[in-house]
Image (spheres, helix red, strand yellow):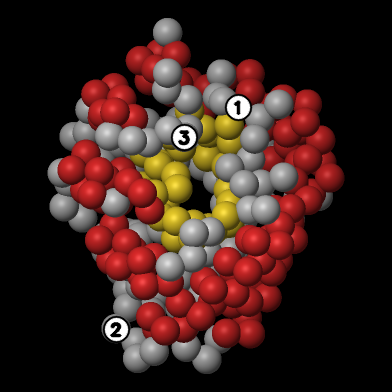
Amino acid sequence: MIELSANLGFLWSELSLPDAIRRAGAAGFAAVECHWPYETDAGAVADALAETGLPMLSLNTRRGQPGENGLAALPGREGEAREAIGQAFEYGARIGARCVHVMAGAARGQAGAEATFLANLAYAADLACDTGMGVLVEPLNRRDAPGYLHATVEEAAALVRQLARPEVRILFDCYHQQIMGGDLVTRFAAHKDLVGHVQFAAVPTRAEPDRGEVDYPWLLPALQAAGYAGPFGAEYKPTGATDDGLAWMRAFTA
């Protein structure tokens, strides 16, 4: 059985986060995830989650200044990065979130960036132990996020293996990894023991997943057969009103 998670950073983004959670539940999603919920009262989010029975799978650390796309790999910014990581875990614990996605930032090629990211991820892993949560790292494709520290699952896997903390796992986004080389089932299977979550969207548009070059009604069951057991996160940018574009779900929920 395929379970789907609604990424509320993109879906129903015109609504308040609590109302978007309720809409996701009504639409048939089994879970939700978000980007940066910090302007919304955590109690209201927790109430909506309790009302719908939906788990909150993840939230992101804040991005920093425009164009930075995260702070955790930026040398000399460790204080800001750890403040952002602490903020995410504190908020996440209040709403019962399962994971924090620690955003590395536009640090590719900077001296010390990998070491900085490793140290900040170790800090995040300690907080994960304290809160019973997990840590996610996500490679972002170089077309949409030029300069981001990691672009491929192979790069992220090397980092996670070097860190050797079981709390830290990879967010495998099919959209990003299709752009960065495709061969999704084989590449997922090679790193399945390190993957903590899977997301998807149409390629190349990042729109509803029933279009574009990836056949998700085939791919998602194939990833399950290869070893993935969690919900699949629908992190796409609707081409219109979210409710008007949900016909793609019938392939998995009928």
Marks 2 and 3, Cα distance to the nearest angstrom?
33 Å
Write the residue at 45% across / 56% down.
169
Q: Amino acid at mark 2?
A: Gly
Write the residue at 69% across / 41% down.
17
Write the residue at 18% across / 43% down.
186
Q: Residues within 10 Å of mark 2 (few under 14, many from 20)?
A: few
Can you tell which mark lies on residue 230? 3
Looking at marks 3 and 1 on the same chain, the residue that comes earlier in the sequence is marked by: 1
Give the SS element for disc 3.
Answer: loop
Q: Picture quarter containing residue 221?
A: top left
Q: Amino acid at mark 1?
A: Ala
Question: Residue 197 or 244: which is nearer the viewer?
Answer: 197
Q: Residues within 10 Å of mark 1 (few under 14, many from 20)?
A: many
Marks 3 and 1, Cα distance to the nearest angstrom?
17 Å
Closer to the camera: disc 2 or disc 3?
3
- Residue 51 picture location, percent across and down: 78, 26
Q: Is residue 180 left or right of residue 23?
A: left
Q: Quadrant of the N terminus?
A: top left
| Residue carrying label 1 | 24
Q: Is residue 178 visible?
A: no
Closer to the camera: disc 3 or disc 1?
3
